[in-house]
Every structure is written in C-alpha cells, then in structure tokens.
C-alpha cells in the first residue's frame, strides 16, 4: 500500500457530516475506554484542512 497523500473534496455539508461522525465515534470510544489517538489525529486534520477557492471569470477560459 502506498504512503502517498490523498485529496478529498467535500462541500460544507459533507465536511460537517464527516466532522460530526468522527466526533460521535470519538465519544463512543471514550465511553468504552478505548484509545482515541487515531480519531483525534484525523479530526485535527479535518478541522485544519484548507478551503480551496473556486476561481471564476475570464482567467478560467481554455482559449487563453
């Protein structure tokens, strides 16, 4: 398996859904007294993820 990075494009709804799902998983793991290190790391990456701006206008033209 490759150790390369993966890029995942999410809209606001998908980002929020993923964030809340991971938080629920983390809370469940805390209740069951399981380590949450992996989920914590993913949550931090998701929270710190950059928002790409969509460029619109004449500079996006293929004929340029």
Image (cartoon, rainbow, N blue to C red):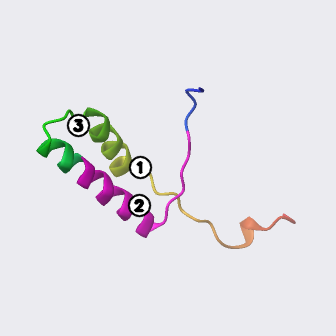
Disc 1 from disc 2: Cα separation: 10 Å
Give the x, y percent position of residue 60: 73, 66
**Which residue sits at x=53%, y=62%?**
53
Q: Which residue is mark 1?
A: 49
Q: In the displayed structure, would residue 37 be above or below residue 64?
A: above
Give the x, y percent position of residue 21: 32, 57
Q: Nearer the viewer, residue 10 or 27?
A: 27
**Relative to 45, 58 lies left or right:** right
- Looking at the image, is mark 2 or mark 3 earlier in the sequence? 2
SS class of the residue under badge 2? helix
Task: Give the number of the mark in front: 3 or 1.
Answer: 3
SS class of the residue under badge 3? loop
Give the x, y percent position of residue 33: 13, 37
Q: Quadrant of residue 64?
A: bottom right
Label 3 Cα crowd, 10 Å radius (few <14 / some 14-19 / many 20+): some
Dots 2, 3 in contact, CB < 8 A: no
Disc 2 from disc 3: Cα separation: 20 Å
Dots 1, 2 in contact, CB < 8 A: yes
Residue 39 on the magenta span: no
**Which residue sits at x=27%, y=40%?**
40
Q: Quadrant of residue 14?
A: bottom left
Task: Give the number of the mark in front: 1 or 2.
Answer: 2
**Relative to 11, 27 lies left or right:** left
Disc 3 from disc 1: Cα separation: 20 Å
Stretch of the chain drawn in magenta: 6-25
Q: Nearer the viewer, residue 16 or 59?
A: 16
SS assignment for the magenta stretch, majority: helix
Q: Which residue is mark 2?
A: 15
SS class of the residue under badge 1? loop
Q: Which residue is mark 3?
A: 36
Label 1 Cα crowd, 10 Å radius (few <14 / some 14-19 / many 20+): few
**Which residue sits at x=12%, y=45%?**
31
């Amino acid at each position: 398996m490759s150790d390369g990075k993966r890029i995942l494009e999410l809209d606001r709804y998908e980002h929020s859904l993923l964030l809340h799902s991971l938080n629920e998983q983390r809370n469940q793991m805390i209740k069951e007294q399981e380590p949450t290190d992996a989920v914590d790391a993913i949550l931090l990456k998701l929270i710190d993820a950059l928002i790409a701006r969509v460029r619109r206008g004449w500079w996006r033209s293929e004929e340029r």
